[in-house]
Structures are given as structure tokens and as C-alpha cells.
Amino acid sequence: MPRSITNKKVLDRYMALAIPDTKVQAMYIWIDGTGENLRSKTRTLDFVPKSPKELPIWNFDGSSTGQAEGSNSDVYLYPVALYPDPMRRGNNKLVLCETYKYNKTIADTNQRKHCLDVMEKAADHHPWFGLEQEYTLLDIDHHPLGWPKNGYPGPQGRYHCGVGAQNVYGRDICEAHYRACLYAGIKIAGTNAETMPAQWEFQIGPAEGIQAGDDLWVARYLLHRIAEDFNVQVSLDPKPVRGNWNGAGLHCNYSTKRMREEGGFQEIEKTIERLSTKHKQHLMAYDPHEGMDNVRRLTGSHEAPDINTFSSGVANRSVSIRIPRLVAEEQKGYLEDRRPASNADPYRVTEKLVTNDCLEQ
């Protein structure tokens, strides 16, 4: 065992120690300068918070996270969402934060504030989202978990929703993450093994407005944190393995109140028409590098749409916008945008859908 890998059972001795009822460990979490990675640090509170508004504003060294210059490095953390902490349990909390510059203006990487403004303007439309987060588990040497070190596993076909040690790698991480999300009050809807071995998916939703993005970011944090305990890495790379292997997306199921009502299918068709005119704009927003990551994934094959062409269809997984078969039969429901990359910012994805569907009619 590498010396950097500690014995987790030793930690249990200390985590079992009782702490005073008036003391709470609050883990502040934020998105760093990459727009896709997370950072965190803990402070002790002398009370049990019931709302993020009760929590103190904090700060961090933005020059170490790509969010400020060293000569003026303090960046503020504004608590915006509060969750029970499944790692420390008890009264301890996870605190999702927005980032603000030294002069209290919005940090360049703070996509949440703009998303919240859009969701509040579109509140009468009651936008719902279901986010399907695909991810890949890697060994500590960056090799896909369970894959032969000098070769490849058998071809795709038997791994999707599979069972058995020959088909599934890393289920314990998926299960631990599922329970942790439920404990934290995150609206996790389910999980499944994906088409490429060592690749998994969890779903968030249905969640209305800003909650979809909040819950997904905290679920991502928990996924990385739990994988850390298993000495495994989580990759959100949209194309983690070159060649004849599926990529990874953040498929976004989206609906408004009118879509969900009787006769909503016509509204779905109108929405698809509106989205078709903003295809390039959406692609720029659907990965942190303005389309450069997604170009490796959106090839028109491996259940992914072609990046160059907007398309839609019923039960077709190689189109930009998929209409589920049941939605077509019931003539109401939702659509699935299959373009977002697995490392996309859910705030940008949901904001762009609502803006171009509800606010620019």
C-alpha cells in the first residue's frame, strides 16, 4: 500500500468522539476558477444553523484557486444552500457558497447568481429539471477502474445497467454516494451503471429552478469526497477514453408547466423550434471550455449527437433533443437535451434553456 494511503479504520476512532451540542462543523464549498472543480474548507460554529442566511460570510485565498491576484487575493464566500453533512453527521453541515470579489461584486466564475436571476424572472413558468450526471471512475494511476493495465476490457454491450464482477467496477462507490445524497436531502432520483465499464450515472430531480444546480454541485462534491475514501478518482471528462467507447454527458431533462399539462406536446415542439435557432450559443455554454471538450464527444456516434447539426426525434439517442417515447404517447411531459458535457456547469445549462425558451419569446 502506498504510504499516502491511510487506514480509514483508524479515523473511525476519532470520528466517534462526541462534540459539544453547541458546536457545529460547517464545510463551506465553492466552485473554483476552472468552473468545474470544487474547493472546501471548514469552520466551527457556536450554533446549529437552520438557514444559509444565518451563516457568516467567509473568505479564501483566490490566488490559489485561479480566482484572484496574489496582491489582492481575498475572495468572499456567501452561503446560499445548506445540507446535512453525511461525512461528519450529527448537526454538522455542508454549505454551498457563491463567490464574490474583494469589492463585493460577483466573481467571474459565479454562474449561480445569473442563473438565480433568470429563474426568478421565469418563476411563473415553473421550470423543472432532471440532470443525468455521467462520470468515470479511475484508479490512482489515472487508468479506468477495473480495466486491464495493458489492454482493454471486452467491447461495450454487457456493461450498461450490468451486474456481476466481470461487468461492473466500483459499485460500492456508487452505492455509498447514493446513500450520502439521500442523507443530505439532495433530490437524487436514481443511479445506474453506464455503457462504458467503470462509468456510472446518477440523476438529480425533478427539481425546480435553482435547486437543480445546487443539488448537482453538492452531489458532485460528495462523489469526489467519497471516492477519496476509496482511493479512487472521479473523472468528468466528456471523452475519458479515446476510440470506440462512449463519452460522458450531463443530459438535461427540461419542462415548463405548460409542457406538463394536457396538450403540452405542442408546447414541447415550440420549445424545440426556439432552441434550434440558438444551437451554437448552447454549445458554448454546455462545457467549461466553450465547446472544446464537447467536440471530442459529440461525433454523431456512441449515442451522442453531431456537434455541427441541431436535430430532434422521438426515442433517438443520437439527436440534440430527444423526446421520450412515453411523452410522445401521452402528448405531454418533457424533453431531453443531450448536448451538455459531463463537466458542464448545471447553472449555465439550466439558465440557457430557460432564457432561450421562456424569456426571449
Image (cartoon, grey):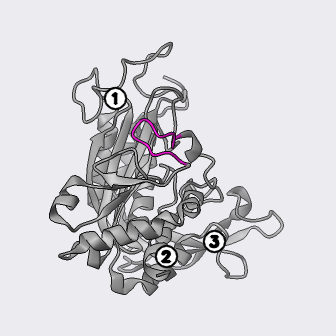
Q: What residue is shown with label 3?
A: 59
Where is 16 relative to 60, above or below? above
Name the residue type under label 1: Tyr
Residue at 31% x, 74% y: name it.
267
Given residues 334 and 207, the one toward you in this image is 334
Name the quadrant containing residue 85.
bottom left
Q: Earlier in the sequence, mark 1 or mark 2?
A: 1
Name the quadrant containing residue 121.
bottom left
Q: Earlier in the sequence, mark 3 or mark 1?
A: 3
Asked if the stretch drawn in magenta spans residue 300, the answer is: yes
What segment is highlighted magenta in the picture? 297-307
Which label number is shown at residue 339? none
Nearer the observer, disc 1 or disc 2?
Answer: 2
Residue at 25% x, 69% y: name it.
265
Asked if the stretch drawn in magenta spans residue 236, the answer is: no
Nearer the observer, disc 3 or disc 1?
Answer: 1
- Disc 1 is placed on an element classified as loop
Name the residue type under label 2: Thr
C-alpha distance separating marks 3 and 1: 39 Å
Nearer the observer, disc 2 or disc 3?
Answer: 2
Q: What residue is shown with label 1?
A: 169
Q: What residue is shown with label 2?
A: 355
